[in-house]
Amino acid sequence: MGAASYKLSQAARLLGVSDDTVRRWVEAGRLTATKHAHGPQTIDGAELAAFAVAQAAETADLDPIEGLGTSARNRLVGLVTKVTKDTVMAQVELQVGRFRIVSLISAEAATELGLEPGVLAVASVKSTNVVIEVPTSGS
């Protein structure tokens, strides 16, 4: 499997920002985009994954957006940031916006899926207990 790369618009969606924000980050040198003779600029997946982790660390202490009502769905799209394998199991870390998701799967499955930093992946979560929060009004 070849190295993953993402168009600027895809990177923007994965990072939860506008296309213009990603373009400004490229212009400022915070991200490196590769120009192609025929087609859009792309960002290397591993670099994007590292950037997503750094961005998440910068915003980890921020409160949720005021007035936001949300219930996360059970399919979380993000970038693989780390894969640690032994002979039987693999620990896979996924950056989903500012959230880090960790999964334990078989090493065989991780290999078959081609999981490595920068690969786009979906974490599907099944739980019998889900907490839903909404901000209180007037406080």
Image: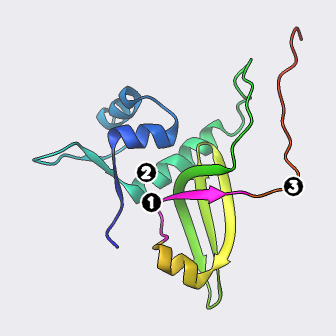
The outermost residue toward the bottom is 87
Question: Can you identify the residue that label 1 sits on?
Answer: 118
Quarter-of-image position of residue 122: bottom right
Local SS, label 2? helix
Identify residue type, mark 1: Gly
Coordinates of residue 139 in the picture (x, y in percent): 89, 11
Coordinates of residue 69 in the picture (x, y in percent): 75, 25
Q: Which stretch did the figure color magenta? A: 115-125
Identify residue type, mark 3: Thr
Q: Which mark is residue 48?
A: 2
Would you place residue 10 above or below residue 65 in this image? below
Q: Earlier in the sequence, mark 2 or mark 3?
A: 2
Q: Residues within 10 Å of mark 1 (few under 14, many from 20)?
A: many
Front-lying residue, 50 or 42? 42
Using residue 122 as the reference point, say whether residue 17 is left or right of it.
left
Local SS, label 1? loop
Coordinates of residue 38 in the picture (x, y in percent): 11, 47
Question: Can you identify the residue that label 3 sits on?
Answer: 128
Quarter-of-image position of residue 9: top left
- For the residues labelled 1 and 3, the Cα–Cα distance comes to 30 Å
Q: What residue is rendered at 65% in x and 89% in y?
A: 88
Q: Residues within 10 Å of mark 2 (few under 14, many from 20)?
A: many
Asked if residue 122 is among those painted magenta in the image, a careful observer would answer: yes
Front-lying residue, 129 or 33? 129
Asked if residue 55 is among those painted magenta in the image, a careful observer would answer: no
